[in-house]
């Protein structure tokens, strides 16, 4: 049985008690492996008490948790911040966390067949010559391209790179088109509720959503410009629809977010829920009729799109980054990101909100499309990649 080590980023734990796209994906793999007993996993993760308690339920995964507190950690972070031009860490916290990881690996008695670094390319730069394990980068964001310092050296620290989309793969290959890079699409658990009437009923009552309302759902971790937040609000205000609600699910923790809420306050049909735990999101997907993912940055993948498809929801999306790889015209309205983006988004909202037949047809196509990105496909494809390159 192959021994595989996952090195997680420095911010959120596994199991994914605090959410996080990368953390949820890795936890998906761990759970599938519990069923199939294919590998023996080890996970290096930031410490979290709740996550640590849940970790005891896994039989084929061991966890090592690392605390990032105290005076020593502060000094390390300060060191990396001052001397950042000499290092390629994405931030000072990442540098400090890596130092802890590096020390832990030196003391490890276990030898790993594969070490998978999750979304922190710079870690491999410092680990490659200290380990004989097959070193793989699982890249979830556009963190390794010709735009980054030492990109060629970092890329060539890895035996293989698994990119979450062809878009990310192309970006990496711009550095060196002979590099070993392949695409491993994400997969998500279904957001379809088997029996969630009581949950959806309470949500509708809480947010004053009637049975006759059409519901657009816009979910994001927090209200940020890159996800097209202001564009969604502007388009919805411009459409000025009756009997239509816009649910915005995400943390409001910035001046930008507060300004968005202020702009939207003129329309009572725009509802901000604030933070919703990931475990409670399926009920919101069940309530929704249409999903909105109008990212204005180059989206590396777009897990939210897959979550909508899994619930049978058609989506309105932009054409940025990897999004066109995920959807088809049968399940999505794809809007070109240009000077007319808000106007075209507004027209699309109007068109689909009152076109029940089109929504039904697109909903069927969404469910079919989801099968290409479900968690089972992800697990099988992960095994194929690991077994072929390690």
Image (cartoon, rainbow, N blue to C red):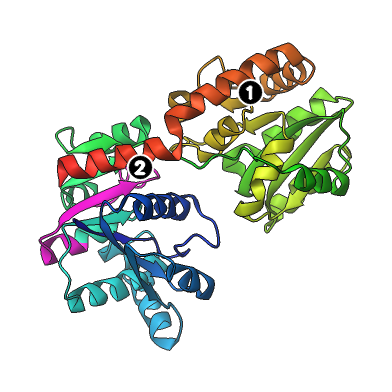
Residue at the far bottom in the pictured view: 71
Q: Position of 31 compared to 256: left or right?
A: left
Residue 6 in sight in this render = yes
Q: What residue is at 68 percent from the left and 33 percent from the top?
A: 231
Is 174 in front, or is 101?
101
Quadrant in the picture for the N terminus: bottom left
Q: Which residue is mark 2?
A: 379
The quadrant in which residue 165 appears is top left
x 21%, y 47%: residue: 155
Quadrant housing residue 141: top left
Measure how far apart labels 1 and 2 are at the Cα level.
36 Å
Residue 42, compared with residue 351, is above or below; it is below
Q: Dot 2: within a 10 Å radius of its alpha carbon, few (fewer than 14), some, or many (20 or more) residues?
A: many
Specify start and end residues of the magenta stretch as a single range: 126-150
Residue 351 vertical placement versus 389 (above, below): above
- Does residue 295 appear in the picture of this structure? no
Task: Look at 38% across and 70% down and name the residue there.
Answer: 81
In depth, the one of 6 and 85 nearer the eye is 6
Residue 82 pos. (x, y %): 36, 72
Residue linked to disc 1: 341
At x 24%, y 72%, the residue is 102
Where is residue 254 drawn, in percent x and y? 67, 57
* Residue 58: quarter of image: bottom left
Indicate whether residue 131 is drawn in magenta.
Answer: yes
The reply to whether the magenta stretch includes residue 19 is no
**x and y percentages locating residue 197 in the rendered image:** 77, 42
Looking at the image, is mark 1 or mark 2 nearer the viewer?
2
Q: Element at badge 1? A: helix
């Amino acid at each position: 049985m192959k021994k595989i080590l996952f090195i997680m980023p420095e911010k959120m734990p596994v199991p994914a008690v605090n959410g996080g796209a990368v953390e949820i994906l890795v936890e998906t793999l761990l759970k599938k492996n519990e069923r199939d007993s294919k590998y023996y996993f080890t996970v290096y993760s930031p410490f979290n008490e709740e996550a640590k308690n849940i970790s005891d339920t896994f039989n084929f995964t061991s966890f090592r948790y690392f605390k990032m507190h105290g005076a020593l950690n502060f000094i390390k972070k300060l060191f990396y911040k001052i001397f950042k031009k000499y290092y390629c860490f994405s931030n000072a916290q990442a540098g400090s966390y890596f130092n802890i990881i590096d020390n832990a690996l030196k003391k490890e008695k276990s030898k790993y067949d594969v070490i998978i670094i999750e979304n922190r390319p710079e870690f491999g730069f410092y680990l490659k010559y200290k380990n004989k394990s097959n070193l793989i980068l699982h890249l979830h964001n556009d963190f390794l391209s010709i735009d980054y310092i030492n990109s060629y050296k970092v890329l060539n620290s890895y035996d293989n790179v698994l990119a979450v989309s062809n878009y990310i793969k192309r970006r990496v290959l711009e550095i060196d088109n002979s590099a070993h890079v392949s695409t491993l699409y994400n997969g998500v658990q279904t957001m379809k509720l088997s029996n969630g009437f009581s949950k959806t009923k309470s949500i509708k009552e809480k947010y004053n959503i009637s049975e006759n309302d059409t519901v657009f759902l816009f979910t994001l971790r927090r209200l940020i410009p890159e996800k097209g937040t202001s564009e969604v609000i502007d388009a919805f205000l411009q459409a000025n629809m009756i009997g239509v609600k816009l649910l915005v699910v995400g943390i409001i923790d910035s001046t930008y977010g507060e300004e968005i809420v202020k702009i939207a306050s003129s329309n009572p049909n725009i509802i901000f829920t604030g933070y919703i735990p990931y475990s409670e999101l399926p009920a919101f997907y069940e309530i929704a009729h249409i999903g909105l993912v109008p990212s204005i940055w180059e989206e590396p993948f777009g897990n939210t799109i897959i979550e909508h498809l899994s619930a049978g929801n058609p989506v309105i999306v932009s054409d940025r980054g990897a999004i066109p790889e995920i959807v088809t015209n049968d399940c999505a309205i794809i809007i070109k990101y240009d000077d007319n983006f808000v106007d075209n988004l507004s027209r699309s909202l109007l068109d689909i909100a009152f076109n029940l037949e089109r929504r039904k047809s697109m909903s069927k196509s969404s469910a079919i499309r989801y099968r290409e990105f479900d968690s089972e496909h992800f697990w099988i494809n992960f095994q194929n990649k690991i077994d072929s390159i390690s």
